[in-house]
């Protein structure tokens, strides 16, 4: 069994369920695909030294919504019942649902009506948006955490657009992309000074960023995110996205991990990066599938305006200050 900190067990397969055993494979597979016990021990040790589980708990209503696996005929009612248990979140959901963002002409007066009109996955996405905002809380004024928020929201907005050219549900894509970097957010909340040092380095590729995190924290943000989501007992789908969005599996068809990976890369290239990156927007777009290239502008500035407008609309409803791109971004609006 793994070590315990604050009652949580970081031996990711210790809970014994199928998703957590598979999650350990995702978290600890080496380049050759083998599971290394020494890697598991190193990540466990770093997690306990960082006191990862001593972070403020992620809002319970959001975790339960992500865990919710309902039958089609009952899932709308189940989500409504869950949200209704938290009056603060229910009120915020109604405020978001009645905003101009979603174009509902009639007034939405109940969470059940919101779920019915906006859809099950869309309301889960709204709930997660509120949850991430709440999780960061007053710390959102800190530049490093604001950068994490902007990157996550940009990735979610981009993933939603990319998904419309695939068989992947756009609202599922939004939710997965919104929380794909929860591990980076956790590391930045635990040691903001350390992560700020990383931000001061020159443009890096994703592999170099992960190695720099391992040098600083003993684990990278993908490992941290996978551990947190496993501790929260989230579905394997989200654990895979958090654990592997920088190294998606190669396959003939684009899966959710691959889609979120693309959204993350495009968000970075548009300037919504936490650490200055070396990738260029035009190079990424050039490699996109044909269907995506038909809907994603070839010019970065045009797409940046579109994404920034959507983000500012969401942040306006959430009563947050306007988003900002990375100061070293090569793209300007």
Image (cartoon, rainbow, N blue to C red):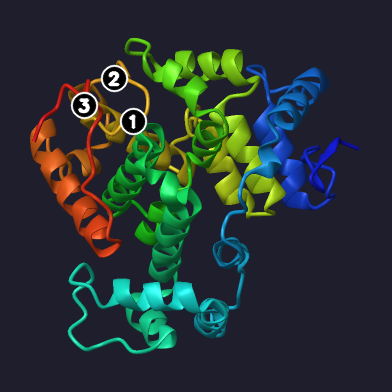
Q: What's the mark number on residue 281?
A: 3
Residue 158, image x, y percentages: 28, 45
Q: Are marks 3 and 2 in contact (CB under 8 Å)?
A: yes
Mark toward the start of the polypeptide (2 vs 1): 1
Which part of the image, by quadrant, shows the N terminus?
top right
Q: Which residue, as the protein is rendered here, is positioned at the far top?
A: 202
Residue at point 80% right, 53% down? Answer: 17
Foreground residue among 137 and 84: 137
State the SS at label 2.
loop
Residue at 63%, 23% in the rendered image: 219
Tag 3, which secondary structure?
Answer: helix
Count every numbered label the image shows and give the total. 3
Q: Which quadrant of the figure contains the C terminus? A: top left
Location of mark 2 (residue):
279
Q: Label 1 belongs to which residue?
A: 265
Q: Secondary structure at mark 1?
A: helix
Q: Residues within 10 Å of mark 1 (few under 14, many from 20)?
A: many
Q: Quadrant of residue 127 in the image?
A: bottom left
**Residue 108 locus on image (x, y percent):** 30, 86
């Amino acid at each position: 069994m793994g070590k315990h900190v604050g009652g949580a067990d970081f031996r990711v397969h210790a809970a014994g369920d199928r998703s957590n055993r598979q999650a350990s494979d995702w978290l600890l597979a080496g380049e050759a695909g083998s599971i290394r016990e020494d890697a598991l021990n190193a990540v466990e040790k770093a997690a306990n030294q960082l006191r990862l589980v001593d972070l403020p708990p992620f809002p319970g209503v959001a975790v339960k919504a992500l865990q919710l696996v309902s039958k089609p005929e009952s899932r709308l009612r189940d989500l409504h019942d869950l949200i209704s248990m938290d009056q603060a979140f229910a009120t915020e959901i109604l405020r978001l649902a009645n905003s101009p963002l979603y174009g509902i002409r009639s007034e939405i007066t109940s969470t059940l009506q919101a779920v019915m009109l906006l859809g099950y996955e869309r309301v889960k996405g709204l709930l997660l948006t509120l949850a991430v905002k709440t999780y960061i809380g007053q710390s959102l004024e800190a530049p490093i955490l604001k950068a994490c928020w902007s990157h996550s929201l940009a990735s979610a907005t981009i993933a939603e657009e990319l998904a419309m050219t695939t068989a992947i549900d756009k609202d599922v894509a939004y939710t997965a992309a919104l929380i794909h970097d929860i591990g980076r957010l956790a590391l930045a909340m635990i040691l903001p000074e350390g992560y700020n040092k990383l931000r001061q380095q020159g443009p890096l590729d994703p592999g170099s960023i992960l190695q720099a995190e391992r040098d600083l924290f003993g684990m990278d943000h993908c490992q941290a995110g996978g551990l947190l989501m496993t501790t929260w007992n989230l579905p394997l789908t989200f654990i895979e996205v958090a654990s592997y969005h920088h190294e998606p599996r190669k396959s003939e068809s684009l899966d959710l991990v691959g889609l979120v990976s693309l959204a993350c890369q495009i968000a970075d290239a548009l300037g919504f990066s936490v650490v200055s990156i070396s990738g260029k927007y035009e190079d990424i777009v050039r490699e996109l599938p044909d269907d995506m290239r038909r809907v994603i502008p070839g010019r970065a500035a045009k797409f940046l305006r579109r994404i920034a407008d959507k983000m500012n609309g969401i942040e306006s409803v959430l009563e947050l200050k306007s988003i900002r791109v990375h100061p070293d971004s090569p793209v300007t609006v």
